[in-house]
């Protein structure tokens, strides 16, 4: 026993009371000096005192609370890691970092965005790698790429999911996502932006042609899913890849409303830990995720509105789509959007 120790009496001797606590205030050669309270100190022989008391239980010490995570530092770590990896990125793949309260989980060259559904729960932030590899987007399409990506970041229905909205800054520091939105919106925004480099051959020429001719980004983006400029020849396609943020089977009126009104409210945010292998983005955009009667689909309505020409006969018949027909179709889409405003 030492000076300052608190003890409790278990075998009363002298003036000690069973169950009472006492403090040792001094120690002599053969005695302990004990504080009996109210400034009264009494000596006790060491042997007898040691038999009379035991050490009092020490109050539990609460651990010091951990400091809040430095999210800014974790985001910077993520930006640096993704930027370092940028020039080694495999074509068409996506890279991002998930910032959790205590660590950064990096996903390099992921084939899809399912890994955003990290099992530890909703992240503090997500940093998305904006591709700047010339092997992915050739020099001839770099200006088109910037127009397309800038539309997604700033003006598209997915723009709400981006904290960083400047394309050039994104090439240097990557893109910070807004994880206050649920996984459907964040994943959908990542997929929409990814189309700028994964589908540059299919989408950028059409998008650039339309916006350069005064068509809105909304209409240009929608038609870039269906029209491909092959050299100087327009070709009608129906893009259905799972790496698209939209699907050609979605109801046309649903997509028109989505571009004009944006995302509607969700009854309950889907937690990040839930699987989103199928991205879960379609249900938030169109009724039944696009499973509607054929005549109501976007593909059916746009293809019927397109004024194409048939040339040749028999096996030699070809479909010719003129520049004017493309612009007329874009204006048809814009007129439908105006009806929703």
Image (spheres, rainbow, N blue to C red):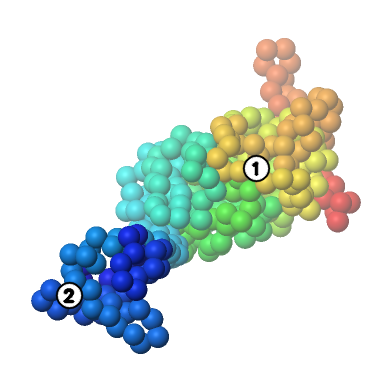
- Which residue is at 40% across, 85% downward? 38
Q: Quick one: which residue is furthest to the right in this view? A: 339
Q: Residue furthest bottom?
A: 39
- Viewer-side residue, 178 vs 143: 178
Query: Could you classify mark 2 by the number of other residues whose Cα lies within 10 Å: few (under 14), some (14-19), or many (20 or more)?
Result: some
Left or right, 311 with respect to 19, comes to right
Rendered view: 283 above or below 51: above
Task: For marks 2 and 1, give the CA distance.
Answer: 70 Å
- Disc 1 residue crowd, few under 14, some 14–19, many 20+, Cα 10 Å: some
Q: Position of residue 301 (x, y in %)?
A: 82, 33
Residue found at the very far top of the displayed protein: 314
Is the residue 321 above or below the residue 189 in the image?
Answer: above
- Assign the N terminus to one quadrant of the image: bottom left
Q: Residue at left 67%, top 46%? A: 269
Q: Mark 2–mark 1 contact, CB under 8 Å?
A: no
Residue beneath disc 2: 31
- Residue carrying label 1: 270
């Amino acid at each position: 026993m030492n000076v300052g120790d608190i003890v409790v009496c278990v075998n009363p001797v002298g003036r000690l009371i069973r169950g009472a606590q006492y403090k040792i205030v001094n120690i002599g050669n053969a005695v302990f000096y004990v504080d009996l309270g109210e400034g009264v100190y009494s000596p006790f022989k060491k042997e007898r005192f040691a038999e009379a008391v035991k050490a009092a239980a020490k109050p539990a010490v609460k651990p010091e609370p951990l400091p809040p995570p430095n999210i800014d530092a974790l985001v910077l770590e993520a930006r640096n890691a993704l930027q370092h990896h940028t020039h080694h990125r495999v074509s068409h793949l996506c890279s991002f970092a998930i910032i959790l309260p205590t660590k950064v989980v990096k996903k390099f060259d992921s084939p899809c965005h399912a890994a955003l559904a990290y099992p530890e729960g909703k992240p503090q932030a997500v940093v998305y790698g904006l591709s700047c590899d010339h092997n992915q987007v050739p020099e001839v399409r770099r200006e088109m790429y910037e127009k397309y990506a800038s539309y997604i970041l700033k003006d598209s229905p997915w723009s709400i999911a981006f904290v960083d909205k400047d394309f050039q800054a994104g090439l240097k520091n990557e893109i910070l996502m807004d994880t206050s939105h649920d996984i459907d919106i964040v994943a959908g925004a990542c997929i929409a932006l990814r189309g700028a480099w994964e589908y540059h051959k299919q989408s950028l020429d059409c998008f650039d042609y339309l916006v350069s001719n005064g068509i809105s980004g909304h209409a240009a983006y929608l038609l870039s899913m269906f029209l491909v400029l092959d050299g100087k020849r327009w070709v009608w396609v129906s893009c259905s890849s799972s790496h698209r943020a939209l699907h050609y089977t979605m109801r046309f009126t649903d997509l028109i409303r989505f571009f004009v009104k944006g995302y509607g409210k969700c009854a309950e945010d889907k937690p990040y830990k839930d699987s989103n292998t199928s991205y879960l983005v379609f249900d938030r955009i169109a009724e039944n995720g696009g499973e509607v009667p054929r005549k109501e689909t976007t593909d059916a309505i746009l293809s019927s509105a397109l004024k194409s020409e048939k040339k040749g006969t028999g096996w030699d018949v070809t479909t010719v789509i003129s520049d004017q027909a493309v612009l007329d179709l874009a204006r048809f889409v814009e007129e439908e959007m105006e009806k929703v405003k």
